[in-house]
Amino acid sequence: MRGYKRFFPLLLVLLVLTGCGQMGQDSPARQEAEPVTEIVTETVTEDTAQGDGEAQEPSVQAIAQQAAQEPETEEPVAEEPETEAPETPAPLVCIDPGHQSHGNSSKEPNGPGSSTMKAKVTGGARGVSTGKYEYELNLEVSLKLRDELERRGYQVVMVREENDVDISNVERSQVANDAGADAFIRIHANGSENSSANGAMTICMTPSNPYNKELYPRSKALSDAVLDALVEATGCKREYVWETDTMTGINWCQVPVTIVEMGYLSNPAEDEKLSTEDYQLAIASGIADGIDSFFAQYPPASE
């Protein structure tokens, strides 16, 4: 025992040194923890690596973070294009310079289905002082009226623009009908056995016209408006609106119509005046004023 006690301190030192050496070695717990650490490290590396090889798919956490950082943008609302209302076309006026250089005595019905037959067209009157034929005067004024109406923005259709034609009264009405004219203005000059007769008048159908009485209200309004404005523009005598169902060129109409008798070629003074440029321009301006007034009362869109 005394020998054992002598070596005991040395044995104790050895035991301590042996225990410390074992602590420097890997324990089972450490050996199991290291692989977990490596896995975690690999996962972090896959989520954060950039630029090595193919692009890595972002993690769910990364997608959520990116969505939170990006501001929400509203989809633009497509604005409907503004559509302009279609423009109303300008009124269409048909002008018929009455008569022609050579009359046509062949007959045609006075109205649709009528048994009354009348000459298709005549040459018209002639100035007692100037010797000018009515068909010439009618065309001169009609061309000025055309120009005036076009300056005011109207659409214009001419039945004729020269004197050497052969157009019957039925055919003249048909030109206006086919064009769908909003107003039909027939230009004429008057004549009388009484050389003192003077002034202007207009002509339309009666309210009981057997062919187109439905046109009477507008045709009468057109006749009144044109006559009033013509008298105001020229200072001539105002006669009246003659309502009659004897005019072939009125009876075949399907559009508002008036015949304008500008003055009397049988009156020397009025005949001279009708041939002057200034008076013809005044007539054209006056008729155009009357047409303006008519369309103010009966706009084309309402027809």
Image: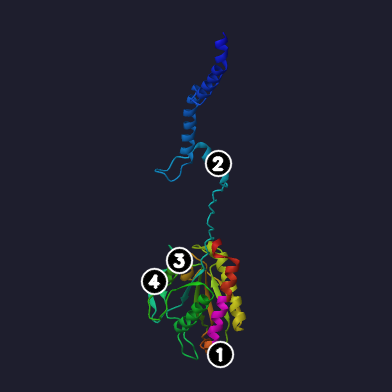
Return the x and y of residue 76 as percentages of the image width and height. 54, 51
Tag 4 secondary structure: strand
Question: Disc 2, disc 3: CB below 8 Å?
Answer: no
Residue on which disc 3 sits? 177
Which mark is nearer the camera, 4 or 2? Answer: 2
Q: Distance between the residues labelled 4 and 2?
A: 99 Å
Return the x and y of residue 49 as percentages of the image width and height. 46, 42
Chain-order first, disc 1 or disc 4: 4
Q: Residue at x 42, y 81 (%)?
A: 123
* Magenta run includes residue 286: yes
The magenta region covers 278-288
Residue on which disc 2 sits? 65
Return the x and y of residue 301 as percentages of the image width and height. 54, 62
Question: Disc 1, disc 3: CB below 8 Å?
Answer: no
Residue on which disc 1 sits? 269
Q: How crowded is mark 3: few (under 14 residues within 10 Å), some or many (20 or more)?
A: some
Q: Residue at x 52, y 88 (%)?
A: 277
Q: Which of 298 and 260 is in front in this view?
A: 298
Quarter of the picture containing the N terminus is top right
Return the x and y of residue 77 as percentages of the image width and height. 55, 51
Q: Main secondary structure of the magenta part?
A: helix
* Magenta run includes residue 48: no
Chain-order first, disc 2 or disc 3: 2
Picture layout, residue 130 above or below residue 39:
below
Chain-order first, disc 4 or disc 2: 2
Q: Residues within 10 Å of mark 1 (few under 14, many from 20)?
A: some
Q: Distance between the residues labelled 2 and 1?
A: 103 Å
Which residue type does callout 1 highlight?
Ala
